[in-house]
Image (cartoon, helix red, strand yellow):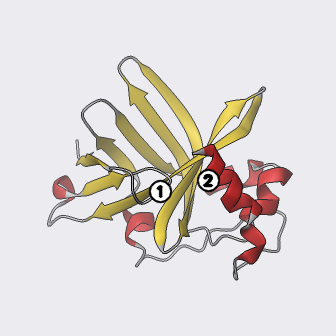
Amino acid sequence: MRILLFFLLSMSPAFLFSQTKKTLEINYNKENVVASSIDGIWKAKNNNLEFISDPTVLEAISDHYFQHLKEFKIYHAGIMKVARRETEKAHPFILTELNGNPYLIFFRERDDKPYGDAESFILFIARGETKSQDRLFIGGDFNNQPFEEYTRDVR
């Protein structure tokens, strides 16, 4: 996963869209299904995810990542909480697109830096007739990896 992210970030000048300010900006569009639907709690077999909108996470992105990510159009940003068994971790994330696919990049602490490491995955949301029928599908970095299905928790 890191190899693909490094490649993508090193190739970012090839992208047509660029952000020019020192802080990344969100290009929210209510017609973007993933960006407009991802917030909330999602459940799978072995873990739960919670997405919380928080555009201020963009202000903390280091210069290193900013230089690479400024070429991407960002549709959403916030905190992704991952709960497995008895543990929960929170990670800042941004939602962009890659090769026409919705693409989420999240940051993990490394070497005492909250944004020290970046990971990523492809994702899709299929909306149901009701929110309880919504489905989130999360894959890997590549389109040949299997997707895990999550259902929305509407408590």
Residue ID at (61%, 53%): 4
Local crowd at mark 2 within 10 Å, few (<14), some, or many (≥20)?
few
Can residue 116 be seen in this snapshot? yes
Q: Is residue 14 left or right of residue 81?
A: right
Quote the CA–CA distance across marks 2 and 1. Answer: 8 Å
Report if the CB atoms under discs 2 and 1 are less than 8 Å apart.
Answer: yes
Residue 151 picture location, percent across and down:
23, 47
Residue ID at (44%, 34%): 82
Q: Mark number for residue 43?
A: none
Q: Which quarter shows the C terminus?
A: top left
Local crowd at mark 1 within 10 Å, few (<14), some, or many (≥20)?
few
Q: Is residue 67 left or right of residue 41?
A: right
Mark earlier in primary sequence (2, 1) = 2
Q: Is residue 112 above or below residue 106?
A: above
Callout 2 amino acid:
Leu
The mark tally for this picture is 2
Q: Mark number for residue 4?
A: 2
The residue tagged with tag 2: helix, strand or loop?
helix
* Residue occupied by mark 1: 142
Can residue 23 be seen in this snapshot? no
Q: Is residue 113 above or below residue 25?
A: above
Callout 1 amino acid:
Phe
Residue 69 picture location, percent across and down:
72, 62
Residue ID at (70%, 82%): 16
Q: Is residue 147 above or below residue 129?
A: above
> Which residue is at the front of the view, 54 or 82?
82
